[in-house]
Image (cartoon, grey):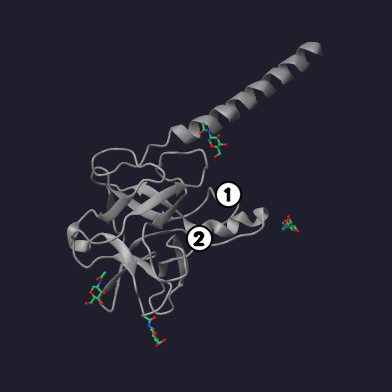
Amino acid sequence: MKLMRSIGTLSCIWLVMAISAIAQSSNDSLPAVLDTTGQALERGVEYYIKPAITDNGGRFTLINRNDSCPLYVGLENVSGLDGFPVTFTPFVEEETVIRENRDTKVVFSAETTCVQSTAWKLDERDPETERRLIVTGEIVVDEENQSWRRAGNYFKLRKADVGDNIYNIEWCPTEVCPFCRFICGTAGGLIENGKRLLALDGSVLPVVFERA
Ligand SMILES: *[C@@H]1O[C@H](CO)[C@@H](O)[C@H](O)[C@H]1NC(C)=O
Ligand SMILES: *[C@@H]1O[C@H](CO)[C@@H](O)[C@H](O)[C@H]1NC(C)=O
Ligand SMILES: *[C@@H]1O[C@H](CO)[C@@H](O)[C@H](O)[C@H]1NC(C)=O
Ligand SMILES: *[C@@H]1O[C@H](CO)[C@@H](O)[C@H](O)[C@H]1NC(C)=O
């Protein structure tokens, strides 16, 4: 009887150790997202985002879709020096490096005349194209127990299948809300009236990150 109990206690300790080992390593084992020079992307540092293939437009920028606020996330028409850099803020507060497949906020470093923040936000599904655009604005949540509502402000960077330091931008904020069931999506270009907008649910636009 006594032996049985101590085995039970022992295996319980083992289980706890195994779980904490998984929890610990799960953060560090995910590779850092790398910029065009192979350096890890860091929290709060400015980067330009641009298509891995230059035919697909220029740097990421704010698009005035329809002479009104809010501004949308999109691309310059041609590659060049225009566009606005972004900063990344990982959902996990103590994390200083941007890692693959982890939730991060993305904010343009830009002054605009719109009242909205320049944080990226998932928009409603566009009735015409059935695609979800990326707009700007901050989701403000007063009650801490409603933090899952902020999910619309969090994106993930996933390594593309081909090429070095090339990534896809996804919306699937499972760290912000582990119990939510999202209709996840990958971002690509959507041309509307000659303007290059960023949208989920269609073509995929692989991108690279260039330190500003
Ligand atoms: C790993 O992430 C969890 C929450 O996601 C956090 O509580 C923990 O401190 C992190 N550990 C390390 C080593 O960063
Ligand atoms: C732009 O605004 C006009 C007038 O409000 C509206 O009729 C039109 O559908 C809008 N276009 C887009 C692409 O949102
Ligand atoms: C791209 O070209 C279209 C059509 O000429 C124009 O409306 C739009 O503002 C341009 N985009 C940028 C980011 O300058
Ligand atoms: C969230 O917290 C507020 C106050 O802290 C409380 O009044 C409310 O009932 C809570 N809601 C849920 C769904 O737990």
Q: Which residue is mark 1?
A: 178
Nearer to me, 87 or 129: 87
Mark 1, other Cα within 10 Å: few <14 / some 14–19 / many ≥20: few
Nearer to me, 129 or 108: 108
Q: CA distance from mark 1 to mark 2?
A: 14 Å
Q: Residue at x 50, y 60 (%)?
A: 152
Q: Is mark 1 within 8 Å of ligand 1?
A: no
Disc assigned to residue 104: none
Residue 52, given in percent of the width and then of the height, sits at 23, 53
Left or right, 160 with reference to 105: left
Left or right, 204 with reference to 131: left
Left or right, 161 with reference to 173: left
Residue 144, given in percent of the width and then of the height, sits at 65, 53
Q: Residue at x 29, y 47 (%)?
A: 161
Quadrant location of residue 15?
A: top right
Residue 202, given in percent of the width and then of the height, sits at 35, 66
For badge 1, the amino acid type reads Pro
The answer, for residue 182, to whether it is visible in the render is no
Q: Which residue is mark 2?
A: 152
Element carrying mark 1: loop
User: Are dots 1 and 2 in contact, CB under 8 Å?
Assistant: no
